[in-house]
Amino acid sequence: MEVPVLAPGTRVGPYVVERPLAGGGFGEVYAAQHATLGRPVALKVLHSRHAQNTDLVRRFLREAQMVASIRDPAIVALYDAGVDEPQRIWLAMELLQGIELRERIYRSAPIGAEVGLRWAGQIARALGAVHAQGAIHRDLKPGNVFVVQTPEGEAMKLIDFGIAKIVRPEDGQTMLTRTGESLGTPLYMAPEQFRDAKRVDARADIYSLGALLYELFTRRAPIVATTFPEMVAQILSGTKPPPLQSLRSDLPRHVPDLVHKAMAVDPNDRFQSAEEMLHAMQAPQPTRGRRRRGKLGGTMGGTLRGPSAPPVSGFDATILQDDESKD
């Protein structure tokens, strides 16, 4: 039985629920406020079926400790975590004001190269901070990146670590949720995640960032399919998306090269770390050929060639694997 929707005024730990924000396979998210300090938070309350699994609770709280230890401006802050009666597990996170990157991509003109790479650099730095803690996000996608306003302009916030994979640095072993293990989101998953989700490394996040960037610049998913099996077959067979430069001829030549390298089918052909990819984004590039001036520095980019459309419903949702996998 699922956790019921919590009414405004419900007390969860030291927090008071104000209103629901979102829901999903793992739980509900509420706007809440600390009862004493008055600090607003996003309160994530897990569904009751997960709270009955004591091993999962232990692992979940250990993951929460890992996320709380990461210090990066592009990662949503985790303030607190706890277990209440009756077996209610919750996280208190930074309450963000903004929109999902997915919405930002499709509501405006194509994103220019300078802005797109600046945003991608923020995400890459955040991934580097995650990987430095021995973790892998495994579900990077436009829906898990939030766009917030800052004095310097729009900035990225990486959210939702609910399916992060933790690697013990001391022995290279992994800690994985035994029941309801999340695999990721099909359209942005690296091929190896379909083959063996338990054995992926940080390069799977590099692939996902490449897929995210492809969609950011083209406003279309890198894989176009009408059925789930067709989509998986394309990814596993190494079917390449249309060349980015054929859809965005206004982009500097190094941008398509960067995106397609990140999306290489073989992990050994990708950037081997988030830092390496970030360096490639920031490296000075020679000017080649004529470019339309005034297009690349702002939010507005060039004209898209071909149709653009959000991914098919369901293909951009996180999928779960409900099994009894071993560590």
Image (cartoon, rainbow, N blue to C red):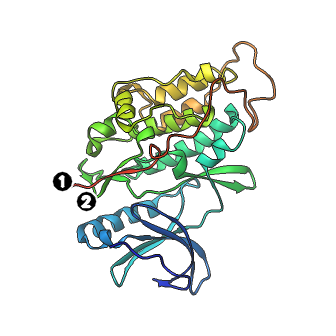
For disc 1, the marked residue is 326
Q: Position of residue 22 (x, y in %)?
A: 52, 64
Q: Position of residue 256 (x, y in %)?
A: 57, 24
Mark 2 and mark 1 in contact? Answer it, CB < 8 Å. no
For disc 2, the marked residue is 179
Q: Is residue 309 above or below residue 153?
A: above
Closer mark to the observer between disc 2 and disc 1: 2
Which sits in the foreground, 59 or 282? 59
Task: Tell me the CA gap for discs 2 and 1.
Answer: 10 Å
Q: Amino acid at mark 1?
A: Lys
Q: Residue at x 37, y 70 (%)?
A: 47
Q: Callout 1: 10 Å neighbours few (<14), some, many (20+)?
A: few
Q: Amino acid at mark 2?
A: Thr
Q: Secondary structure at mark 2?
A: loop
Whether residue 39 appears in this view of the structure is yes
Q: Is residue 23 above or below residue 6?
A: above
Residue 62: which disc?
none
Left or right of residue 221, residue 176 in this image:
left
Q: Callout 2: 10 Å neighbours few (<14), some, many (20+)?
A: some
Q: Position of residue 319 (x, y in %)?
A: 37, 50
Q: Residue at x 34, y 73 (%)?
A: 48
